[in-house]
Amino acid sequence: MDFKEPGDKEPRIVETVNWIANEKDFSYTFDEMLQWIVEGSPILEIDNETHFCDWIVLQEIIAAKAMYDKLDLKKLYKARNRANSFEMIGSVFFMNRAALKMANIDAATNFIFTNIDQSVEHRRSYAPYYFADVCAGPGGFSEYVLWRKKWLFKGFGFTLKSVHDFEMNRSRVVSPVTFNSQYGFYKDGDIFKLENIEHFAKNVKHETEGLGVHFMMSDGAFSVEGKENLQEILSKQIYLCQCLMALKIVRSNGHFVTKVFDLFTPFSVGLVYLMYKCFRKVAILKPNASRPANAERYLICYGLQNSEQTALIRNYLTHIARRLSQIHGVDRNNTVDVNGIVPLTLLKGDEEFFDYIEDSNNRIGEQQIAALRNLEKYYHNPELYYPTHQERLRLQCLKYWNIPESFHRFKPKSATDNLLASVRFWQDLINNEAHLIRTYDDLNKFLTVSLNSNEWCYVLSACTAHTNICTFYSAMDDSNVCRLQQSNWVNVKKLKLIAGTILFGEMVKETVVEDNGRKTRKRSLHVIDALRLGHKSIANLPFTERMANIEVYCQAVNHESRLNNVRIRAKRKLETLTPSVLDGDNHFRLPVLGYKSREESYQINSVLLLNSNKDLTFQISFTSQRMIFLSKTAANENADGTIKLALHSLITAMNNCRKLS
């Protein structure tokens, strides 16, 4: 068989992704599947694993890799930098090369990941799009997604704590506020522990309306120095656990991409087969951004099918994960392993699937052999170098992936006042307070003139006659958030907002009743309106559009796993007032956000009336607002003559006004 070197022909920039569609029935019971599991002595060599590839290809890969055992690593790395046509791509402005791999995969698949918000199955208006990044520290995949989509996408991370942790704060181009890492039940991020998988899946489902993420990415690997030929076998547990995590957290019609290496053994191919039966179609891609001399490739799964078949396979993979954990973790048994999870007869009997795997292995294998031989040539010939060729390919790839050569994230460069100076009517805003309805005459005039326009909504506020907690908040950077307090900007601890944000809201103390009945208090920023949300100015957007943006932003920024941080949520705007909105203690019940919460509420002391005309800008809505204070029982007056009405009295007055009109 003739293996050509990469230099023999021009590399292809636009890659072809060959999909295989899942169109055949899968009719097996769980008990039948349990009989598929093959245990035996651990596989210690791959020389004879030729069920799914050409024997010559496998032997050539092994021989080509063996040549490098005697080479100097430092010289080898230098040779690699010259030999790989795509090496000069580097990381551009991202933290590492992983971000460019995801950009490459995204572009090659016609942006099925970052354009999932445009798909018919997932398009929506009032919530962010969710993704998970698993076994992927320091976070290059997530950095790419957040750079592309900003706060419209919210990310959940899971990876080993400390040594291989996420480092999103290192990024120069994205805000880490809409991304948060979790580490599972044992708080160590070990995906081999089923309790960690279950804990993460439960939390993710809780924060995604019970539906799961729109897509999951995983990039798990570990050092196999000296055992490169066994990388596939040594990686079987991480392969399986990442796939299991995807089946637990990806929503219906969602996508999944995960790194794999060689796919020669029945275990690996069986796992790919089971994932293939859970999704509408799958593909195996060796992207240009992945170095050609290694065995790395990516399994891409499109359109999760929410079916009994998928649930069955999920339970089956859970069983296998538990068995692998027992063998390698609890028992530390080096004499036995799980070597097969789908019968060879079934894998080979599905001719379309078998042909797809064999063709993929042979094609990627031939490319790897050629790259390894080419690398050896560059190792022995230090003068070989074609930087002009590499630079041309770099520019072509970035254009195809829609990545600019440089990027500067919007971040305010100086004091809060300078950020706010960009809002041309800022001084008018800070000098404006909600007009108080102080007397019965004020109330009657307002009700007579304004109420029947049907353009007012009601905001239930914690403000009292003595303490106005509605104010402006601004973020100079992701952790430096201030609030306007008596004409001064005061730092707010443990509140995270995206740099550039300017919003109007109130800080309330929510009462939280946990599942066990215990009551706690939680500080929460309730956002009423906004001028800017991160990089995006919304001051001149119509009222309804601003509210929709605020809803998405708050859901994206709030992470319940940040236990000690200030919570953030969009303030509800009520179209009508009824006595039932409050309980006997003047508490208003909120949608539950906490993982362990049974009930969440806050005390209402006033009603803020906002003009909700859909065409009004922030300035007009803000300067026309009205506020009336409430009492728990009968109407009364404060010492300054300001009236306080019980909610039912206010509702009665409004109803009487409507009758008179």
Image (cartoon, rainbow, N blue to C red):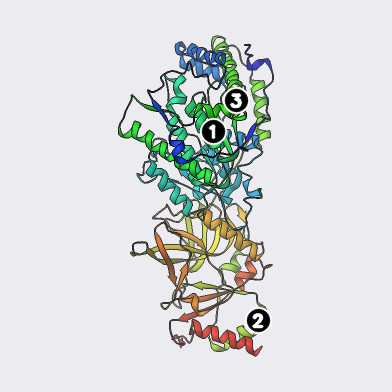
Which numbered tag is attached to residue 360? Answer: 3
Return the x and y of residue 178 as percentages of the image width and height: 51, 50
> Is 496 left, or right, of 428 in this rendering?
left
- Determine contact: label 3, label 1, CB under 8 Å: no
> Is 402 left, or right, of 204 in this rendering?
right
Of all residues, the one furthest to the top in this rendering is 380
Q: Which residue is label 1 attached to?
A: 273
Q: Nearer the viewer, mark 3 or mark 2?
A: 3
Q: Which residue is pictured at 66% across the width and 61% down the height? A: 541
Does label 2 or label 1 sit earlier along the sequence? 1
Which numbered tag is attached to residue 452? Answer: 2
Secondary structure at badge 2 equals: helix
> Which residue is at the front of the view, 531 or 137?
137
Secondary structure at badge 1 equals: helix
Judge whether 315 appears above or below 294 on screen.
below
> Label 2 crowding class (10 Å Cα cut-off): few <14, some 14-19, many 20+?
some
Return the x and y of residue 616 as percentages of the image width and height: 67, 68
Does label 3 or label 1 sit earlier along the sequence? 1
Return the x and y of residue 287 as percentages of the image width and height: 60, 29
